[in-house]
Image (cartoon, rainbow, N blue to C red):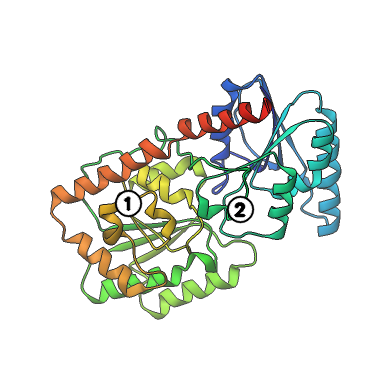
Amino acid sequence: MRLLVLTQKIDLDDDLLGFFHGWLLKLAPRAQNIIALALGVGRYDLPNNIKVFSLGKESADGNSGIIKKLKYTINFYRLIWRFKKDYDIVFVHMNVEYVLLGGLLWRLWRKKIVLWYAHYKNPLKLKLAVVLAHRVVTSTALACRINSEKLSILQQGIDTEKFKPENIENLSLNKILFLGRISPVKKLEVLIGAIKILANSGTKILLDVLGEPAPGNEEYFKGVKNLVQKLGLEREINFLGRVPNFQTPQIYRRHSIFVNLTSSGSFDKTMLEAMSCGLIIFVSNRVFKEVLPPDLHKVLMFREGDSRDLADKISKLLVLEPQRLREIKKQMRESIVKNQNLDRLIEKLVGQFKEINHE
């Protein structure tokens, strides 16, 4: 099996996209060779059968938007042409633009195209990419809302050996974690409201916020910090900046509770990583009904955008018996190991490659 893999970034130190390095490591033993192209490339450590190339984002920062896109496009066509005899299957991770740019050529060259897409938005360009792709794969039906026979649901892929608990018996519940790109869709103000309610009730609890604002969302982040000051929560809430993905396991292990407030549809990997580390999660995203055991839906799922409901759910958790808390923490971990682990995902993905290669 010879692969051309295209993604947004290959960089061990990236806070959001560093995980994809692990995907390449798992694919390497299953492929004869892999040509990996990314918009930008940072630090990596991959086997010899993987060749990594950048489309040039690192060296284009001083250029205008049009010049940047022209440079990326020229490099894209140069590289897919240069190596066209070295791959049979094209695997595009998330960036549907790659399929739109190269789809007709790849079909002309008789290359098979597999697109991974997992996002609550369903833009027109996705629908166009589906026409060109031979197969579309995703993590959950709600994360790829297309009506096509080409769609296969594979679940997510968490490295459960990397993301594992240090001590599943630790029942200290006073530290809450938010980790991710900071933007309005993350609804941090709802979590801050819940912390205020808990603080007013006399509950001693700390919230660590890790992440930086997405481009264009700096004013939102400023507003979030101003809200914390206005509510007098400077002692309860810490803003700690971004951390590279490879450091996140130790971050998870320092906390007990993880909260995600994204709207239904997005299948946030940080939630699954936290569960794999034995954290107890609170979520409003109904996608997680597929992940959480049914007996925990009412315990851990709160009404979307409702600070009071979130605070009430956390309060009830804090007074549970120690044995019940241990059971919930183990359920978090077991759910990911059984259904969402990386080895299982890669096997399914390779199965898709082999299947379409013989069609």
Find residue 276 and name its label: none
Task: Give the residue type at disc 2.
Answer: Asn
Q: Nearer the viewer, mark 2 or mark 1?
A: 2
User: Which residue is denoted by mark 2 in the rendering?
Assistant: 147
CA separation in Å, label 2 and label 1: 40 Å
User: Which residue is denoted by mark 1 in the rendering?
Assistant: 255
User: CB under 8 Å between callouts 2 and 1?
Assistant: no
For the C terminus, the image quarter is top right
Res. 285 image quadrant? bottom left
Question: Does 53 sit above or below residue 217?
Answer: above
Q: Is residue 256 left or right of residue 113?
A: left
Residue 107 image point, x, y percent: 80, 36
Residue 318 image point, x, y percent: 20, 60
Residue 298 image point, x, y percent: 28, 61
Farthest bottom residue in view: 230
Q: Earlier in the sequence, mark 2 or mark 1?
A: 2
For mark 1, give the secondary structure.
loop
